[in-house]
């Protein structure tokens, strides 16, 4: 059975090298006589796996020493609550940018804890653009400023880091972390669910500047306090050990392949050629403003939506799967994270051209 090119938005494709290595170590991890799944999280084998994963992530992302890296559960969605619970620090207002469905979810959760100042919203444009910084209404007294660097559903991405002065900048990087080099020092907190561009579902990475850790709103459960996890090396309770191990294999692979500079070059090339193929045909269309098109999630619609079903059926037969667009957008969406080989994008483009010839 050969593997398909899986364009799912998440859980998404993982590198074949990583899956093969995990398979070869499945029943006996390096002479331990057990699977990583069966190990005590406090035993020396798993501790070595955990420490190596963190060290490799710190190296590839160049994470400064005054940041903690946490390996948590609960998904990015739990972070929608943990961020206000931990970062309000007595303040009553936080800034949020609204560029799509994930921003909206983060905002509605934050409203349970504080006043949300929506700095800017692109909802009137159906979330197809990012309004320029000159139109933003930042509050210099906000507890923090939250944004979604890559909107996984709309396919809208910031290709710059917002300027927010001294207000801590918080980013939901679930679908863009590790896609390119990043200046972590510009951020107060970065979080990402693993199942898009890191590893299996069940693991959530939080990178947080140390001075932001400590104070929580009254009633915050210990599990929702960053301090609990920071003080215990993410082992206050049982962490998602297997997902942590797989993430570590992915970090190692990125290192071997030339780090985030190498990822960025491949990702840009993959995205550029797919957008070029969409733009040069009037059979397909991507609605997103060119300067904020995502490198990771490429939504596109067929001029004739009556052909959507044919497109999905025929791509599937060609080994190109999970291209159906999100229910809120319709059409198609190709998610092309780090693990999607360039040949997968080439195969999709070739298919799209054949499909157009057949039905145009
Ligand atoms: C997938 C996704 C989420 C939700 O992640 P869960 O891990 O399912 O909670 C949040 N934000 C963004 C940007 C996402 O892509």
Image (spheres, grey):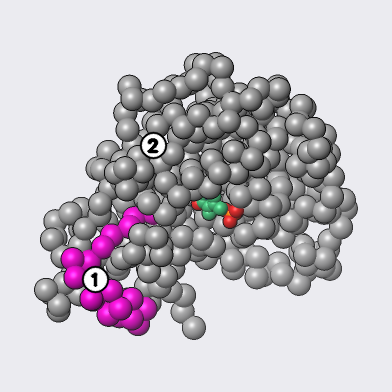
Task: Return the residue at label 2.
Answer: 121
> Relative to 166, does residue 116 appear above or below in the rendering?
below
Is residue 248 visible in the rendered structure shown here? no
Q: Secondary structure at mark 2?
A: strand
Indicate the position of residue 37 as horizontal and vertical percent values. 77, 65
> Relative to 226, does residue 277 appear above or below in the rendering?
below
Q: Residues within 10 Å of mark 1 (few under 14, many from 20)?
A: few
Indicate the position of residue 252 as horizontal and vertical percent values. 60, 49
Indicate the position of residue 60 as horizontal and vertical percent values. 56, 39
Who's the residue at 59% across and 26% down the image?
A: 93
Is residue 16 visible in the rendered structure shown here? yes
Using the rendered view, name the quadrant where residue 24 is placed.
Answer: bottom right
Left or right for 238, reference 179? right
Is label 1 within 8 A of ligand 1 (CB to nearest ligand atom)? no
Who's the residue at 70% across and 46% down the image?
A: 71
Q: Secondary structure at mark 1?
A: helix
Q: Main secondary structure of the magenta part?
A: helix
Q: Is residue 299 magenta?
A: yes
Using the rendered view, name the quadrant where residue 55 is placed.
Answer: top right
Task: Return the residue at label 1.
Answer: 305
> Relative to 210, does residue 247 appear above or below in the rendering?
below
Q: CA distance from mark 2 to mark 1?
A: 28 Å
Who's the residue at 76% across and 72% down the image?
A: 27
Q: Is residue 269 magenta?
A: no
Is label 2 within 8 A of ligand 1 (CB to nearest ligand atom)? no
Which stretch is magenta? 297-317
> Which of 202/122 is in front?
122
Of the two numbered discs 2 and 1 on the same chain, state the one appearing first in sequence.
Answer: 2
């Amino acid at each position: 059975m050969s593997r398909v090119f899986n364009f799912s938005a998440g859980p998404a494709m993982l590198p074949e090298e990583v899956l093969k290595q995990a398979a070869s170590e499945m029943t006996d991890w390096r002479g331990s006589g057990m699977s990583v799944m069966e190990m005590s999280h406090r035993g020396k084998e798993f501790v070595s796996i955990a420490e190596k994963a963190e060290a490799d992530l710190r190296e590839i992302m160049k994470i400064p020493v005054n940041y903690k890296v946490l390996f948590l559960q609960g998904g990015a969605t739990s972070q929608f609550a943990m961020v206000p619970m931990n970062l309000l620090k007595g303040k009553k207002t936080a800034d949020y940018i609204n560029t799509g469905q994930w921003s909206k979810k983060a905002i509605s959760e934050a409203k349970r804890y504080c006043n949300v100042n929506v700095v800017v919203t692109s909802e009137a444009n159906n979330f197809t653009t990012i309004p320029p910084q000159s139109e933003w209404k930042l509050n210099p007294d906000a507890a923090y400023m939250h944004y979604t660097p890559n909107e996984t559903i709309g396919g809208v991405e910031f290709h710059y880091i917002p300027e927010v002065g001294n207000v801590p900048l918080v980013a939901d990087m679930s679908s863009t972390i590790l896609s390119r080099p990043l200046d972590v020092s510009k951020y107060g907190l970065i979080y990402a669910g693993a199942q898009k561009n890191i590893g299996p579902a069940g693991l959530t990475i939080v990178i947080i500047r140390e001075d932001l850790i400590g104070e929580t709103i009254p009633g915050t459960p210990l599990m929702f306090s960053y301090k609990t996890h920071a003080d215990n090396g993410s082992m206050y309770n049982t962490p998602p050990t297997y997902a942590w191990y797989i993430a570590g294999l992915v970090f190692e692979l990125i290192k071997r392949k030339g780090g985030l500079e190498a990822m960025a070059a491949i990702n840009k090339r993959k995205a550029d050629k797919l957008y070029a193929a969409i733009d040069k045909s009037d059979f397909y269309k991507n609605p997103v403003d060119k300067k904020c098109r995502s490198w990771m999630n490429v939504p596109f619609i067929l001029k004739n939506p009556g052909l959507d079903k044919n497109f999905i059926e025929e791509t599937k037969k060609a080994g190109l799967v999970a291209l159906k667009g999100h229910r809120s957008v319709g059409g198609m969406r190709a998610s092309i994270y780090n693990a999607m080989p360039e040949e997968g994008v080439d195969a999709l483009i070739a298919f799209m051209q054949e499909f157009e010839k057949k039905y145009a």
